[in-house]
Amino acid sequence: MVPTLRNTTVAATVNGKPILSAEVERLINNRQGGSNRNFLTQLAQARLQVLDKLIQREVLFQRAERESLLPTEDQINARLMRKRRKAV
């Protein structure tokens, strides 16, 4: 997929880490459905809500990263292997 302006436009930046408009759009498209009443207002509200959620998620992720609360790749792989063994 060739990047377009919308795919690379930064919607927000959290401590130097960008949140792309494409991610906001993807989540909005996942939430769409139902009636079209007040569509433009609802769309604007949805964009702000999604952006707010992405900012909150990024802040929490950065905090976890800074405080070394994130699992290592080895820990993740070990957990996945245990889950796979249980599933079989």
Image (cartoon, rainbow, N blue to C red):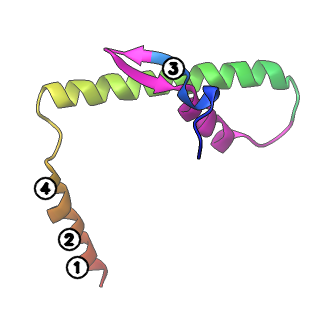
Residue 71 as seen in the image, left or right of residue 14: left
Residue 52 as seen in the image, left or right of residue 82: right
Query: Which corner quadrant holds the C terminus?
Result: bottom left
x, y percentage for residue 79? 19, 62
Query: Is residue 20 part of the magenta span, yes or no?
Result: yes
Q: Nearer the viewer, mark 1 or mark 4?
A: 4
Q: Dot 4 surroundings within 10 Å: few (below 14), some, or many (20 or more)?
A: few
Magenta residues, start to end:
13-35
**Residue at numbered disc 1:** 85
Give the camera-side residue of 76 and 33: 76
**Residue at numbered disc 3:** 10
The amino acid marked with disc number 3 is: Val
Q: Do the residues labelled 1 and 2 touch (CB within 8 Å)?
A: yes
The amino acid marked with disc number 4 is: Gln
Element under disc 1 = helix
Query: Is residue 34 part of the magenta span, yes or no?
Result: yes
**Residue at numbered disc 2:** 81
- Mark linked to residue 75: 4
Q: Do the residues labelled 4 and 2 touch (CB within 8 Å)?
A: no
Question: Residue at horizontal 68%, vertical 20%?
Answer: 45
Element under disc 2 = helix
Q: How far apart are marks 4 and 2 (CA)?
A: 10 Å
Q: Dot 1 surroundings within 10 Å: few (below 14), some, or many (20 or more)?
A: few
Q: Dot 3 surroundings within 10 Å: few (below 14), some, or many (20 or more)?
A: some
